[in-house]
Image (cartoon, rainbow, N blue to C red):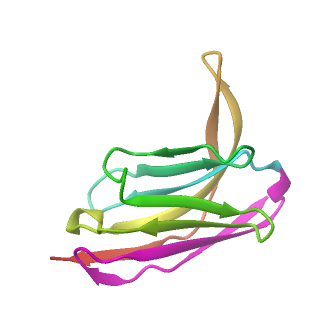
Amino acid sequence: QVQLRESGGASVQAGGSLRLSCAASGYTSGVYCMGWSRQAPGQEREVVSVIYAVGGGTYYSDSVKGRFTISQDNAKNKMYLQMNSLKPEDTAMYYCAAGVRSLDSGSWVCEYRYWGQGTQVTVSS
């Protein structure tokens, strides 16, 4: 089991910045990938960014590419999301997730197994 706790959500004005943090505990040695997803009211949960435990490879959705940066500190079992140039459409509950490696159609993919409780980000225009 892996426990995740997010922090750093807040209300900011458009153009501002925030840094989200995710602290992981438990069986973290089995984690293959970690990432951030978000969900706005009435919308489906969206994968925002992913980082891989080995090698540090990253993925960003088109909606945040160039504005958000994901990073990890393996020694502290922490993951971060630096969010710059925030827009009102970034308003959502942001969730930290941790996953395992899963084989899908012959390729290894990140399969989320663990989720945090979420931290709210609100961007006003």
Query: Is residue 12 found left or right of 97 in the rendered image?
Result: left
* Residue displayed at 29% across by 54% down: 43
* Residue displayed at 24% across by 67% down: 87
* Residue displayed at 55% across by 70% down: 117
Front-most of residues 76 and 97: 76
Query: Is residue 15 found left or right of 4 in the rendered image?
Result: left
Q: Residue furthest front?
A: 66
Dividing the picture into quadrants, the one containing residue 121 is: bottom left
Above or below: residue 34 compared with residue 40:
above
Query: Is residue 31 found left or right of 124 in the rendered image?
Result: right
**Whole-percent x and y of residue 90?**
29, 64
Front-most of residues 63 and 120: 63
Dividing the picture into quadrants, the one containing residue 13 is: bottom left
**Whole-percent x and y of residue 5?**
63, 73
Above or below: residue 84 compared with residue 16:
above
Above or below: residue 100 compared with residue 7:
above
Identify the main secondary structure in magenta. strand
Q: Magenta segment range? A: 1-29
Please tell me whether residue 10 belongs to the stretch shown in magenta: yes
Please tell me whether residue 78 belongs to the stretch shown in magenta: no
Please state, as top left, top right, bottom left or bottom right, where the C terminus lies in the image.
bottom left
Front-most of residues 16 and 77: 16
